[in-house]
Image (tube, grey):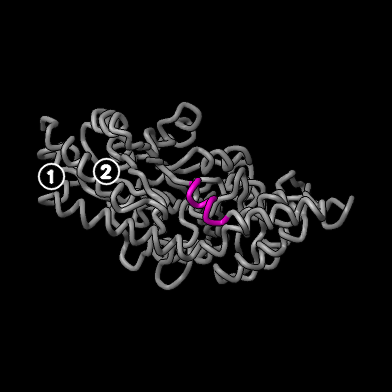
Amino acid sequence: MHFIDLKTQQHAIKPELDRRIAAVLAHGQYIMGPEVAELEQILARFVGVKHCVSVASGTEALLISLMTLGIGLGDEVITSPFTFAASAEVIALLGAKPVFVDVDPRTGNIDASLIEARISSRTRAIMPISLYGQMADMKAIQDVAMRHGNIPVIEDAAQSFGAVSHGRRSCGVSTIGCTSFFPSKPLGCYGDGGALFTDDDMLAQAAREIRIHGQSKRYVHTRIGLGGRMDTLQCAIVLAKWSRFEWECEQRQTIGAGYTKKLLARIAHAAPVSGDDLQSPLTSLRTMVLLPENQSVYAQYTVLTPHREIVQSELNSAGMPTAVHYPVPLNEQPAYRHFDSHAVTPVASWLAEHVMSLPMGPDLAEDDQDRVIDTLSDILAGVPA
């Protein structure tokens, strides 16, 4: 059993994959070839925005987005501590300060009700992370941003491309939406890649220039930029996967719902939020739930469980791989803890000790899912409270 099964997907798309790669090898335009523009047009239509700008990775998408907004030394960007380091990393690289707001215990996404208290005169952007395939509460976040002078919002949608909330797709609900095409993402390439999305013509033009060293045309450098282009071959690979993507999103939702239904059938009731009141290991197991009107793409299927090390070890020994995203909040990491001494994030800290992701993907067989649930339940039933 694989944590993420890319081999089955590759077998299913192999004819189109071979055709797409052969076409790039034939024309030889490995940088900014025709597949780049083709992919950008398809993705912009899918998301429902005017512009898609492909870039070298999800990290570059975030960095370029901040650069288009002119964010730099002394500025502040509000974000979540419960995520991968890239989110805070790009803020710090520009000389700005990441300001960490605690997360919703139901979802792990930034708690929109806590953002307003962390806004200051130096706040230049809000960067929510759409975690585990489900969007943050973007409507509430946008409302806060509007009340404070229309602060730009950058959605870090590295894990949620294809998700829907209130009828809008992830990457299409903010000033700029950013995603990643890292191989394990819902829509992945076979290396690094990413994209940013916006309806703002000026931001899109700035992003296109920044990704090619700030050039408006060859050897005319209108702004400071970087080498941030997505390779033509990687665009071709994403195009080969595209015909299957919406089916894969539906499969992820079906499999995610199946996990929840089958796990809840084994559990008497959900665990309380506080770690101090946990009951038996089996009844304290609970799933990360969705926000209302939020359709996840289940980049991961994540549960909360006590005795995580024991549970992980026994599942792995039984041939069922697991993962932890993320074991240490960013404001507790050595590289970032000095940025925001006023961060108060007890929920993020508690979640970091309890989250565990189970095998997930559009090609996960129902029999394998049942094996995971049965084994997990048996392990928890045998662990002392």
Q: Using the image, determine if residue 353 lies above or below residue 216.
A: above
Report if residue 97 is visible in the image: yes
103, 168: nearer the viewer: 168
The residue under the point 61% across, 43% down is: 191
The residue under the point 64% across, 71% down is: 50
**Residue 152 placement: quadrant:** bottom right
Q: Using the image, determine if residue 307 lies above or below residue 198.
A: above
Query: Would you say 368 lies left or right of 337 here?
Result: left
- Residue 205, numbered label: none
Q: Using the image, determine if residue 63 lies above or below residue 317.
A: below
Report if residue 144 is visible in the image: no
User: Does residue 103 show up magenta in the picture?
Assistant: no
Residue 368: image x %, image y %? 31, 47
Residue 161: image x %, image y %? 50, 58
Badge 2, how many Cα within 10 Å: few under 14, some, many 20+? many
- Residue 283, numbered label: 1
**Residue type indicated by callout 2:** Val
274, 383: nearer the viewer: 383
**Residue 36 placement: quadrant:** bottom right
The residue under the point 61% across, 58% down is: 240
What kind of element bears circle 1?
Answer: helix
Q: Using the image, determine if residue 54 lies above or below residue 304.
A: below
SS assignment for the magenta stretch, majority: helix
Which residue extends farthest right?
219
Please name the residue that numbered disc 2 is placed on: 372
Q: CA distance from mark 2 to mark 1?
A: 17 Å
Query: Would you say 362 lies left or right of 385 here?
Result: right
User: Does residue 10 show up magenta in the picture?
Assistant: yes
- The magenta stretch is 6-13
- Tell me whether circle 2 and circle 1 mark residues in contact (CB < 8 Å): no
Residue 276: image x %, image y %? 15, 36
